[in-house]
DNA sequence: CACGAACCGGAGCACGTGCTCCATTAAACC
DNA sequence: GGTTTAATGGAGCACGTGCTCCGGTTCGTG
């Protein structure tokens, strides 16, 4: 199963394709362990591949990161679709936030970079819009069922999730690793209709969120 | 007004003391603008001082960062005390979270480093404990007035605040800079007693939180 | 004023990182 | 199997960074 780009490329040789997968797999591992500032040398070593090979496939470290984020976006979209299939709309929202935050919590460095990269990369921006679409459906469905406060939109869920996930690697020794679930709980309580008070800055307009200008 | 360390040092000469203040001020500015990875050369330049001077006063870049965090901790403690003086206990909590998140939002890089550094530095850990104490008082006061849900503690407020602040520099162009207030609002709604549902992972024990082992 | 000591700052060192060159290897097709 | 050519990987380059050395300068006191 190909992991990244689609056809247009002039067809990779067998070993090259295999190495590409090895590199992507190694990068996911290493980034998750040491964060985004892990060196390309480390990644190449983990993949059992020369550094030049890595750079032939991904001309820039950024390109590699972008490719990995692309993979994760596909997983996220799949999760969102699965949550849309839940019979209980609120549980769909809950499961989505939970799943997204959990993955962001495991892949330590990635989540932070995701935001920047999907502004810089048009491909990623498109993928992101698709996820945002699914998220908006989740929100509207829950709102129609009176399970979710009315004054929020899909993008709010994304931002909330990212805030919670940022709590994943608190450096204090002895803290349980899943403490972020506690704060997701508080957030979820704040998302119920009963809890709603007026939110001061309004939701960002759809136009701004859906079409982040590529600089 | 001396900004950092106390007496024990063998008394700084006039120009040396002045330069120290210049360096700290410049570091706060530069870190806030470019984040923590701003170079020492930039900071020295901004302070109008040679690089060697910077390193004579702060033998390590980490020492400089730690000193700055110390300054901010004093400000945080002052804020907490001021909020404790509010007549409305809930407003005290609200103002505290708001103020803390706002400062974290302005000083882009610092907030992230704060967590790591106050684990590594014993001095900072002590300061942190003091702030935590004040925060706990804020929480208990609001809980007694039935303005805050019962199942949270002081440290929860700190973590929630840090989560909200992490939303301060979303890279999407066109987003208003104070969007984090919106999500603090949702969080605050989740902190009211009426909103409370059972939180899954319990609060971290006081022992773990108050005495982070210095490695 | 004059003198010793504290202090200064720019040039330089060591190191890690992203990225490239090129002689060697091995896949693919006849 | 032989030939072509894509693919490989280790040595090396350029650069930025944290940090230091040392000749010159300024502060503080008698």
Image (cartoon, coloured by chain):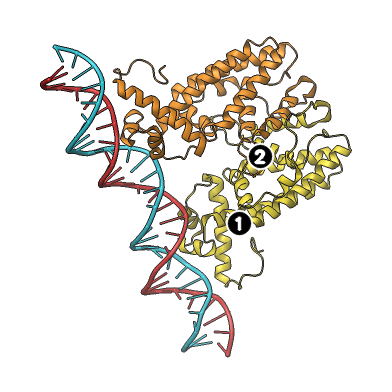
Chain colours: A yellow, B orange, C red, D cyan
Q: Which of C18 and A72 lies nearest the eye of the viewer? A: C18
Image location of residue B39, percent across then percent down: 42, 40
The reply to whether residue A15 is visible in this rendering is: yes
Q: Is residue C25 above or below residue A74?
A: below
Q: Residue at x 57, y 29 (%)?
A: B104
Spot occupied by residue A128 in the image (x, y as percentages of width and height): 70, 51
Per the rendering, the mark at residue B49 is: none
Question: Mark 1 sits on what residue?
Answer: A67
Secondary structure beneath label 2: helix
Residue with the mark numbered 2: A162
User: Counting other residues with Cα less than 10 Å from the Cα at mark 1, is it few (<14), some (14-19), or many (20 or more)?
Assistant: some
Distance from Cα at disc 2 to Cα at disc 1: 20 Å
Q: Is residue B153 among the parts visible in the rendering?
A: no
Q: Residue furthest right?
A: A145
| Residue located 46% across and 27% down the image | B68
Q: Quadrant of residue A92?
A: top right
| Label 1 SS | helix
Residues at discs 2 and 1 in contact (Cβ within 8 Å): no
Nearest to the observer: residue B31 or residue A52: B31
The residue nearer to you, when weighing C15 against A28, is: C15
Q: Position of residue A100 (x, y in %)?
A: 69, 43
């Amino acid at each position: 199963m190909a992991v990244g780009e689609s056809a247009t490329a002039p067809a990779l040789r067998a070993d090259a394709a295999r190495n590409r997968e090895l590199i992507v797999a190694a990068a996911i591992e290493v980034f998750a362990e040491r964060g985004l500032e892990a060196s390309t040398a480390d990644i190449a070593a983990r993949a059992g591949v020369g550094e030049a090979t890595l750079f032939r496939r991904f001309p820039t470290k950024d390109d590699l990161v972008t490719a990995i984020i692309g993979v994760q976006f596909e997983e996220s979209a799949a999760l969102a679709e699965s949550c849309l299939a839940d019979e209980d709309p609120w549980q769909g929202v809950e499961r989505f936030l939970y799943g997204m935050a959990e993955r962001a919590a495991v892949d330590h460095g990635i989540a932070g970079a995701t935001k920047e990269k999907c502004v810089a990369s048009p491909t990623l921006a498109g993928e992101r819009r698709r996820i945002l679409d699914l998220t908006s459906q989740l929100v509207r469905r829950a709102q129609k069922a009176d399970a979710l406060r009315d004054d929020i939109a899909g993008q709010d869920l994304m931002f909330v999730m990212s805030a919670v996930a940022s709590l994943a690697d608190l450096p204090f020794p002895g803290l349980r690793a899943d403490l972020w679930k506690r704060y997701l709980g508080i957030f979820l309580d704040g998302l119920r209709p009963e809890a709603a008070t007026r939110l001061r800055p309004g939701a960002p307009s759809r136009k701004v969120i859906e079409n982040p200008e590529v600089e």
